[in-house]
Image (spheres, rainbow, N blue to C red):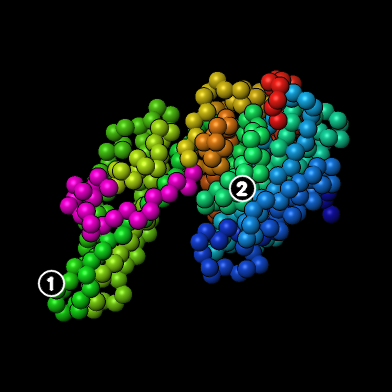
Protein backbone atom coordinates (compact mmCIF):
# COMPACT_ATOMS: atom_id res chain seq x y z
CA UNK A 1 0.00 0.00 0.00
CA UNK A 2 1.36 3.43 -0.95
CA UNK A 3 2.46 5.67 1.90
CA UNK A 4 0.86 9.06 1.31
CA UNK A 5 2.36 12.32 2.62
CA UNK A 6 1.11 13.55 5.97
CA UNK A 7 -1.03 16.21 4.27
CA UNK A 8 -2.88 13.66 2.13
CA UNK A 9 -3.41 11.32 5.07
CA UNK A 10 -4.83 14.25 7.02
CA UNK A 11 -7.03 15.28 4.09
CA UNK A 12 -8.49 11.80 3.69
CA UNK A 13 -9.31 11.68 7.39
CA UNK A 14 -11.10 15.04 7.14
CA UNK A 15 -13.09 14.11 4.03
CA UNK A 16 -14.22 10.89 5.72
CA UNK A 17 -15.91 12.92 8.47
CA UNK A 18 -19.26 14.28 7.22
CA UNK A 19 -19.69 17.98 8.02
CA UNK A 20 -22.59 19.07 5.84
CA UNK A 21 -24.04 22.53 6.32
CA UNK A 22 -27.84 22.04 6.28
CA UNK A 23 -28.25 25.50 4.73
CA UNK A 24 -31.78 25.81 6.07
CA UNK A 25 -32.88 22.31 5.06
CA UNK A 26 -34.52 19.86 7.45
CA UNK A 27 -34.53 16.80 5.16
CA UNK A 28 -30.89 15.75 5.60
CA UNK A 29 -29.75 12.74 7.66
CA UNK A 30 -28.76 13.93 11.12
CA UNK A 31 -25.55 11.89 11.06
CA UNK A 32 -24.02 13.93 8.22
CA UNK A 33 -25.07 17.40 9.44
CA UNK A 34 -22.97 19.84 11.45
CA UNK A 35 -19.33 20.42 12.26
CA UNK A 36 -19.11 18.97 15.79
CA UNK A 37 -17.36 15.71 14.81
CA UNK A 38 -14.82 17.29 12.49
CA UNK A 39 -14.09 20.13 14.93
CA UNK A 40 -13.36 17.55 17.63
CA UNK A 41 -11.09 15.66 15.23
CA UNK A 42 -9.12 18.81 14.32
CA UNK A 43 -8.88 19.74 18.01
CA UNK A 44 -7.43 16.30 18.69
CA UNK A 45 -4.84 16.70 15.92
CA UNK A 46 -3.84 20.09 17.29
CA UNK A 47 -3.57 18.65 20.80
CA UNK A 48 -1.14 16.06 19.46
CA UNK A 49 0.97 18.97 18.22
CA UNK A 50 0.97 20.43 21.73
CA UNK A 51 -1.66 23.14 21.17
CA UNK A 52 -4.62 23.82 23.44
CA UNK A 53 -7.67 23.91 21.21
CA UNK A 54 -11.01 25.46 22.15
CA UNK A 55 -14.33 24.39 20.69
CA UNK A 56 -16.75 27.30 20.25
CA UNK A 57 -20.31 27.42 18.98
CA UNK A 58 -23.57 25.68 19.75
CA UNK A 59 -26.15 23.30 18.33
CA UNK A 60 -23.59 21.19 16.50
CA UNK A 61 -22.31 24.25 14.60
CA UNK A 62 -18.88 23.99 16.18
CA UNK A 63 -15.67 25.82 15.32
CA UNK A 64 -12.18 25.13 16.64
CA UNK A 65 -9.54 27.71 17.66
CA UNK A 66 -5.95 27.08 18.74
CA UNK A 67 -2.80 29.17 19.10
CA UNK A 68 0.90 28.44 18.57
CA UNK A 69 3.14 31.18 19.91
CA UNK A 70 6.49 32.09 18.39
CA UNK A 71 7.42 34.55 21.11
CA UNK A 72 6.71 37.97 22.51
CA UNK A 73 6.28 40.66 19.91
CA UNK A 74 6.07 38.36 16.89
CA UNK A 75 3.54 39.09 14.17
CA UNK A 76 0.34 37.05 14.43
CA UNK A 77 -1.20 35.24 11.46
CA UNK A 78 -4.67 33.69 11.63
CA UNK A 79 -5.34 30.90 9.14
CA UNK A 80 -9.04 30.14 8.66
CA UNK A 81 -10.16 26.98 6.87
CA UNK A 82 -13.86 26.28 7.07
CA UNK A 83 -15.02 22.87 8.24
CA UNK A 84 -18.46 22.75 6.68
CA UNK A 85 -19.36 21.54 3.20
CA UNK A 86 -22.37 21.95 0.97
CA UNK A 87 -24.87 19.04 0.84
CA UNK A 88 -24.09 15.93 -1.19
CA UNK A 89 -27.22 15.57 -3.36
CA UNK A 90 -26.44 14.30 -6.86
CA UNK A 91 -22.83 13.37 -6.20
CA UNK A 92 -21.45 10.74 -8.56
CA UNK A 93 -18.93 9.47 -6.01
CA UNK A 94 -19.20 8.41 -2.39
CA UNK A 95 -18.86 11.85 -0.77
CA UNK A 96 -17.21 10.53 2.39
CA UNK A 97 -14.91 7.90 0.88
CA UNK A 98 -11.74 9.89 0.07
CA UNK A 99 -10.55 7.88 -2.91
CA UNK A 100 -7.24 8.75 -4.58
CA UNK A 101 -7.38 8.42 -8.35
CA UNK A 102 -4.33 9.39 -10.36
CA UNK A 103 -3.02 12.64 -8.93
CA UNK A 104 -6.20 13.75 -7.12
CA UNK A 105 -8.14 13.17 -3.90
CA UNK A 106 -11.90 12.92 -4.38
CA UNK A 107 -14.71 13.61 -1.92
CA UNK A 108 -17.01 16.28 -0.59
CA UNK A 109 -14.95 19.11 0.82
CA UNK A 110 -11.74 17.80 -0.73
CA UNK A 111 -10.94 21.21 -2.17
CA UNK A 112 -13.54 23.34 -0.39
CA UNK A 113 -11.77 23.56 2.03
CA UNK A 114 -10.51 20.49 3.86
CA UNK A 115 -7.34 20.52 1.75
CA UNK A 116 -6.42 23.88 3.25
CA UNK A 117 -6.76 22.59 6.82
CA UNK A 118 -4.86 19.39 5.97
CA UNK A 119 -1.99 21.40 4.48
CA UNK A 120 -1.84 23.65 7.55
CA UNK A 121 -1.75 20.70 9.96
CA UNK A 122 1.06 19.06 7.98
CA UNK A 123 3.06 22.29 7.78
CA UNK A 124 2.60 23.04 11.47
CA UNK A 125 3.89 19.55 12.37
CA UNK A 126 7.06 20.13 10.34
CA UNK A 127 7.66 23.65 11.64
CA UNK A 128 7.16 22.73 15.30
CA UNK A 129 9.31 19.63 14.91
CA UNK A 130 12.14 21.84 13.63
CA UNK A 131 11.51 24.45 16.32
CA UNK A 132 11.40 27.22 13.75
CA UNK A 133 8.08 28.98 14.33
CA UNK A 134 8.66 32.69 13.63
CA UNK A 135 5.07 33.95 13.53
CA UNK A 136 2.39 33.51 16.16
CA UNK A 137 -0.31 31.36 14.58
CA UNK A 138 -4.03 31.20 15.31
CA UNK A 139 -5.53 28.08 13.72
CA UNK A 140 -9.23 28.42 12.99
CA UNK A 141 -11.55 25.79 11.60
CA UNK A 142 -14.82 27.66 11.32
CA UNK A 143 -18.39 26.44 10.97
CA UNK A 144 -21.06 27.74 8.62
CA UNK A 145 -18.92 29.41 5.95
CA UNK A 146 -21.24 28.06 3.26
CA UNK A 147 -24.16 30.10 4.55
CA UNK A 148 -23.99 32.91 7.11
CA UNK A 149 -20.51 32.76 8.69
CA UNK A 150 -21.84 32.08 12.18
CA UNK A 151 -18.53 30.35 12.89
CA UNK A 152 -16.45 33.47 12.29
CA UNK A 153 -18.71 35.45 14.61
CA UNK A 154 -18.16 32.79 17.30
CA UNK A 155 -14.39 32.84 16.73
CA UNK A 156 -14.17 36.64 16.94
CA UNK A 157 -16.23 36.61 20.13
CA UNK A 158 -13.88 33.97 21.55
CA UNK A 159 -10.81 36.07 20.70
CA UNK A 160 -12.37 39.18 22.23
CA UNK A 161 -10.12 42.22 21.97
CA UNK A 162 -7.23 40.11 20.69
CA UNK A 163 -6.84 40.46 16.95
CA UNK A 164 -4.28 38.94 14.58
CA UNK A 165 -2.19 41.14 12.32
CA UNK A 166 -3.70 39.49 9.26
CA UNK A 167 -5.82 36.59 8.08
CA UNK A 168 -5.31 33.98 5.38
CA UNK A 169 -8.53 32.18 4.40
CA UNK A 170 -7.98 28.89 2.58
CA UNK A 171 -10.38 28.68 -0.34
CA UNK A 172 -9.69 26.93 -3.65
CA UNK A 173 -7.82 29.60 -5.64
CA UNK A 174 -5.41 27.35 -7.58
CA UNK A 175 -2.67 28.88 -5.38
CA UNK A 176 -3.35 32.43 -6.54
CA UNK A 177 -3.41 35.20 -3.94
CA UNK A 178 -6.86 36.77 -3.87
CA UNK A 179 -7.03 40.29 -2.51
CA UNK A 180 -10.56 41.25 -3.58
CA UNK A 181 -13.97 39.67 -4.04
CA UNK A 182 -17.60 40.67 -4.14
CA UNK A 183 -19.95 40.39 -1.19
CA UNK A 184 -23.22 38.48 -0.97
CA UNK A 185 -26.58 39.92 0.06
CA UNK A 186 -29.77 37.86 0.01
CA UNK A 187 -33.11 39.65 -0.09
CA UNK A 188 -36.59 38.18 0.27
CA UNK A 189 -39.59 40.06 -1.13
CA UNK A 190 -43.24 39.27 -0.39
CA UNK A 191 -46.23 40.17 -2.52
CA UNK A 192 -49.51 40.50 -0.63
CA UNK A 193 -52.69 39.96 -2.64
CA UNK A 194 -56.25 38.90 -1.90
CA UNK A 195 -57.46 35.35 -2.40
CA UNK A 196 -60.66 34.40 -4.19
CA UNK A 197 -62.08 31.64 -6.40
CA UNK A 198 -60.35 31.50 -9.77
CA UNK A 199 -63.71 31.51 -11.54
CA UNK A 200 -63.99 35.19 -10.60
CA UNK A 201 -60.36 36.46 -10.49
CA UNK A 202 -61.46 40.09 -10.54
CA UNK A 203 -62.77 39.68 -7.00
CA UNK A 204 -59.23 39.12 -5.72
CA UNK A 205 -55.74 40.46 -6.15
CA UNK A 206 -53.23 37.99 -7.62
CA UNK A 207 -50.03 38.03 -5.56
CA UNK A 208 -48.10 36.11 -8.24
CA UNK A 209 -48.94 38.75 -10.84
CA UNK A 210 -47.86 41.49 -8.44
CA UNK A 211 -44.62 39.63 -7.81
CA UNK A 212 -44.05 39.17 -11.53
CA UNK A 213 -44.31 42.92 -12.02
CA UNK A 214 -41.81 43.44 -9.23
CA UNK A 215 -39.37 40.92 -10.69
CA UNK A 216 -39.46 42.50 -14.13
CA UNK A 217 -38.86 45.93 -12.61
CA UNK A 218 -35.99 44.63 -10.46
CA UNK A 219 -34.38 42.98 -13.49
CA UNK A 220 -34.80 46.18 -15.50
CA UNK A 221 -33.21 48.36 -12.84
CA UNK A 222 -30.44 45.82 -12.25
CA UNK A 223 -29.17 46.56 -15.75
CA UNK A 224 -27.98 49.90 -14.38
CA UNK A 225 -25.42 48.02 -12.25
CA UNK A 226 -23.46 47.14 -15.39
CA UNK A 227 -22.86 50.84 -16.03
CA UNK A 228 -21.08 51.33 -12.69
CA UNK A 229 -18.23 48.80 -12.63
CA UNK A 230 -15.65 48.57 -9.89
CA UNK A 231 -12.11 49.02 -11.32
CA UNK A 232 -11.06 45.55 -10.13
CA UNK A 233 -14.22 43.50 -9.62
CA UNK A 234 -16.40 44.80 -12.42
CA UNK A 235 -20.11 45.49 -11.89
CA UNK A 236 -22.32 44.35 -9.05
CA UNK A 237 -24.79 41.66 -10.13
CA UNK A 238 -28.31 40.53 -9.27
CA UNK A 239 -29.96 37.15 -9.77
CA UNK A 240 -33.49 35.93 -9.09
CA UNK A 241 -33.01 32.59 -7.33
CA UNK A 242 -36.29 31.25 -5.87
CA UNK A 243 -39.99 31.97 -6.39
CA UNK A 244 -42.76 30.52 -4.25
CA UNK A 245 -46.49 31.22 -4.25
CA UNK A 246 -49.97 29.84 -4.73
CA UNK A 247 -51.90 26.93 -3.28
CA UNK A 248 -53.92 25.49 -6.15
CA UNK A 249 -54.79 26.42 -9.73
CA UNK A 250 -58.37 27.27 -8.78
CA UNK A 251 -57.38 29.77 -6.07
CA UNK A 252 -56.18 33.29 -6.81
CA UNK A 253 -53.07 33.45 -4.61
CA UNK A 254 -52.94 35.95 -1.79
CA UNK A 255 -49.22 35.62 -1.16
CA UNK A 256 -46.00 35.02 -3.12
CA UNK A 257 -42.28 35.41 -2.40
CA UNK A 258 -39.06 35.81 -4.32
CA UNK A 259 -35.46 35.41 -3.15
CA UNK A 260 -32.83 37.65 -4.72
CA UNK A 261 -29.06 37.12 -4.76
CA UNK A 262 -27.14 40.40 -4.98
CA UNK A 263 -23.35 40.44 -5.35
CA UNK A 264 -22.05 43.66 -3.83
CA UNK A 265 -19.00 45.84 -4.38
CA UNK A 266 -16.63 47.01 -1.60
CA UNK A 267 -18.29 50.41 -1.30
CA UNK A 268 -21.81 48.94 -0.93
CA UNK A 269 -23.62 47.99 2.27
CA UNK A 270 -26.73 45.94 2.88
CA UNK A 271 -28.73 49.13 3.51
CA UNK A 272 -27.86 50.28 -0.02
CA UNK A 273 -29.27 47.09 -1.52
CA UNK A 274 -32.50 47.37 0.46
CA UNK A 275 -32.87 51.02 -0.53
CA UNK A 276 -32.39 50.19 -4.23
CA UNK A 277 -35.02 47.43 -4.12
CA UNK A 278 -37.52 49.66 -2.30
CA UNK A 279 -36.92 52.48 -4.79
CA UNK A 280 -37.73 50.08 -7.64
CA UNK A 281 -40.97 49.02 -5.95
CA UNK A 282 -41.99 52.65 -5.46
CA UNK A 283 -41.27 53.50 -9.08
CA UNK A 284 -43.41 50.53 -10.16
CA UNK A 285 -46.30 51.64 -7.95
CA UNK A 286 -46.11 48.53 -5.77
CA UNK A 287 -45.62 50.14 -2.36
CA UNK A 288 -47.67 48.25 0.23
CA UNK A 289 -48.34 45.38 -2.17
CA UNK A 290 -44.77 44.10 -2.47
CA UNK A 291 -42.41 44.59 0.47
CA UNK A 292 -38.79 43.74 1.22
CA UNK A 293 -39.26 41.27 4.08
CA UNK A 294 -35.59 40.63 4.72
CA UNK A 295 -32.25 41.81 3.41
CA UNK A 296 -29.23 40.04 4.89
CA UNK A 297 -25.52 40.28 4.20
CA UNK A 298 -24.22 36.72 4.00
CA UNK A 299 -20.64 37.70 3.12
CA UNK A 300 -19.09 41.19 3.07
CA UNK A 301 -16.95 42.15 0.08
CA UNK A 302 -13.17 42.13 0.32
CA UNK A 303 -10.65 44.67 -0.98
CA UNK A 304 -7.19 44.46 0.55
CA UNK A 305 -4.74 47.03 -0.90
CA UNK A 306 -2.24 45.52 -3.32
CA UNK A 307 0.67 46.88 -1.29
CA UNK A 308 -0.56 45.49 2.05
CA UNK A 309 1.73 43.38 4.21
CA UNK A 310 -0.33 40.14 3.79
CA UNK A 311 -0.08 40.43 0.01
CA UNK A 312 3.71 40.79 0.09
CA UNK A 313 4.08 37.90 2.54
CA UNK A 314 1.98 35.50 0.46
CA UNK A 315 3.56 36.45 -2.86
CA UNK A 316 7.03 35.99 -1.37
CA UNK A 317 6.05 32.57 0.01
CA UNK A 318 4.74 31.49 -3.39
CA UNK A 319 7.87 32.60 -5.17
CA UNK A 320 10.07 30.84 -2.59
CA UNK A 321 8.49 27.50 -3.53
CA UNK A 322 8.86 28.11 -7.24
CA UNK A 323 5.30 29.24 -7.96
CA UNK A 324 4.50 32.48 -9.78
CA UNK A 325 3.27 35.14 -7.40
CA UNK A 326 -0.13 35.79 -8.96
CA UNK A 327 -2.42 38.44 -7.47
CA UNK A 328 -6.03 38.14 -8.52
CA UNK A 329 -9.68 38.65 -7.59
CA UNK A 330 -12.78 36.43 -7.64
CA UNK A 331 -16.54 36.86 -7.80
CA UNK A 332 -17.46 34.44 -5.00
CA UNK A 333 -17.57 35.46 -1.35
CA UNK A 334 -15.42 34.09 1.49
CA UNK A 335 -14.95 34.46 5.23
CA UNK A 336 -11.96 36.70 4.48
CA UNK A 337 -14.53 39.43 3.89
CA UNK A 338 -15.97 38.85 7.37
CA UNK A 339 -12.56 39.15 9.03
CA UNK A 340 -11.78 42.24 6.94
CA UNK A 341 -15.08 43.83 8.01
CA UNK A 342 -13.91 43.25 11.61
CA UNK A 343 -10.83 45.34 10.83
CA UNK A 344 -8.25 42.63 10.07
CA UNK A 345 -6.42 42.75 6.69
CA UNK A 346 -7.23 39.51 4.88
CA UNK A 347 -6.31 37.48 1.82
CA UNK A 348 -7.50 34.23 0.26
CA UNK A 349 -5.14 31.46 -0.87
CA UNK A 350 -5.50 27.72 -1.19
CA UNK A 351 -5.21 24.55 -3.27
CA UNK A 352 -7.84 23.38 -5.72
CA UNK A 353 -10.17 25.04 -8.19
CA UNK A 354 -13.48 26.71 -7.44
CA UNK A 355 -14.75 25.13 -10.65
CA UNK A 356 -14.70 21.75 -8.86
CA UNK A 357 -16.07 22.92 -5.51
CA UNK A 358 -19.67 21.83 -4.81
CA UNK A 359 -19.61 19.51 -7.85
CA UNK A 360 -20.64 15.88 -8.31
CA UNK A 361 -16.97 14.81 -8.43
CA UNK A 362 -15.24 17.30 -6.16
CA UNK A 363 -11.48 16.77 -6.00
CA UNK A 364 -8.15 18.47 -5.38
CA UNK A 365 -4.72 17.90 -6.97
CA UNK A 366 -2.26 16.23 -4.60
CA UNK A 367 0.63 18.38 -5.83
CA UNK A 368 -1.25 21.59 -4.98
CA UNK A 369 -1.96 20.34 -1.45
CA UNK A 370 1.73 19.55 -0.97
CA UNK A 371 2.72 22.93 -2.43
CA UNK A 372 0.36 24.60 0.03
CA UNK A 373 2.17 22.77 2.85
CA UNK A 374 5.43 24.35 1.72
CA UNK A 375 3.79 27.78 1.42
CA UNK A 376 2.57 27.51 5.00
CA UNK A 377 6.04 26.45 6.10
CA UNK A 378 7.53 29.58 4.52
CA UNK A 379 4.89 31.79 6.14
CA UNK A 380 5.41 30.26 9.59
CA UNK A 381 9.20 30.05 9.45
CA UNK A 382 9.95 33.25 7.55
CA UNK A 383 11.10 36.41 9.24
CA UNK A 384 8.13 38.46 10.39
CA UNK A 385 7.98 42.06 11.59
CA UNK A 386 7.58 42.71 15.29
CA UNK A 387 4.29 43.96 16.64
CA UNK A 388 3.86 46.95 18.89
CA UNK A 389 3.98 46.17 22.63
CA UNK A 390 0.71 44.92 24.07
CA UNK A 391 -0.33 42.93 21.00
CA UNK A 392 -1.49 39.35 20.86
Rendered image: mark on residue 202? 1
How far is the residue under mark 1 from the one under mark 2? Answer: 52 Å
Q: Quadrant of residue 308?
A: top right
Q: Start and end of the magenta stretch?
A: 278-299
Query: In this rendering, is residue 13 above or below 354?
Result: below
Q: Secondary structure at mark 2?
A: helix
Query: In this rendering, is residue 244 above or below 351?
Result: below
* Relative image position of residue 42 (x, y in whole percent): 74, 50
What residue would you read off at disc 2?
154
Q: Residues within 10 Å of mark 2 (few under 14, many from 20)?
A: many
Task: Name the N-terminal-most of marks 1 and 2.
Answer: 2
Quarter of the image with the N terminus in it: bottom right
Residue at 62% x, 68% y: name it: 30
Q: Quadrant of residue 193?
A: bottom left
Of 36 and 92, nearer the camera is 36
* Relative image position of residue 285 (x, y in whole percent): 17, 52
Rendered image: mark on residue 235? none
Please state if 224 lies on the left or on the right of 161 as rendered: left
Residue 111 seen in this snapshot = no
Residue 23 seen in this snapshot = yes
Of 140 and 58, nearer the camera is 58
Q: Secondary structure at mark 1?
A: helix
Amino acid sequence: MKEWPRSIRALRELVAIPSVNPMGRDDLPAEIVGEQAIAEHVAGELARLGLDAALVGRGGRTSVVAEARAGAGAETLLVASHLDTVPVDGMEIDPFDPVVEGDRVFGRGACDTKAGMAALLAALFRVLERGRLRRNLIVVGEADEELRSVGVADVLAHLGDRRPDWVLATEPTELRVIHAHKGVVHARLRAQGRACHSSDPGAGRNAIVLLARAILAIERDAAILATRPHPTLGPATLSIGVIRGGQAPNIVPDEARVWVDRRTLPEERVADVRAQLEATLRAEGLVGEVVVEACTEEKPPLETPRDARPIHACLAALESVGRPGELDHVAFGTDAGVFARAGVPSVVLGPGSISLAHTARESVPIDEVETMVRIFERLLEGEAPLRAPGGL
